[in-house]
Image: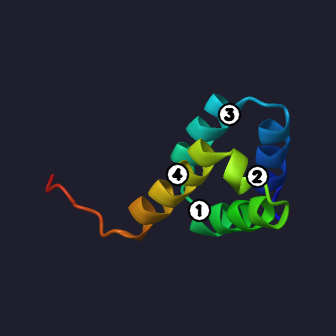
Amino acid sequence: MTEWVTKMLALIKSGNIPAAVAQIKATTSSKDLRQLHAALDKAKALPRLRAVELAINDQLQALASPRLSRSP
């Protein structure tokens, strides 16, 4: 488990869900997101944290889509 995932679990455990969602939306690592999802799933916390699960899924989808590039 990466340091980011550990920090995110602590943030979620503290109850600061809006900050957790903001951090999830700012991450660029799909590996970290998958680890966070797995940890929350293992703890059976996902049903209570619908906003966090939606943010994780949205960010994973955004990271998987091709980027549109703009010419200079």
**Disc on the earlier residue, 4 or 2:** 2
Distance from label 4 to label 2 (Cα)? 18 Å
Dot 3 and dot 1 residues touching (CB under 8 Å): no
In the image, what residue type sits under mark 4?
Leu
Q: Secondary structure at mark 4?
A: helix
Nearest to viewer (mark 3 / mark 1): 3
| Residue located 72% across and 60% down the image | 36
When the figure is inspected, residue 27 is found, relative to residue 63, above or below; the finding is: above
Q: Would you say the residues marked 4 and 1 are in contact, meaning their CB atoms lie under 8 Å apart?
A: no
Task: Residue 16 in the image: state x and y as whole percent.
Answer: 73, 29
Q: Give the mark nearest the N terminus, 2 or 3.
A: 2
Q: Amino acid at mark 3?
A: Ile
Residue 48 is marked as: none
Residue sticking out furthest to the front: 47
Asked which secondary structure carries label 1, the reply is: loop
Q: Label 2 to label 1, Cα distance in Å? A: 10 Å
68 lies left or right of 45:
left
Is 67 placed left or right of 50 in the picture? left
Residue at image location 84% in from the left, 52% down from the top: 6
Residue at disc 3, secondary structure? helix
Residue located at (53% from left, 49% from top): 55
Mark 3 or mark 4, which has the lower sequence index? 3
Given the image, on which type of amino acid does mark 2 rest? Answer: Trp
Residue 4 drawn above or below residue 17: below
Q: How is the image coloured?
A: rainbow
For disc 3, the marked residue is 17
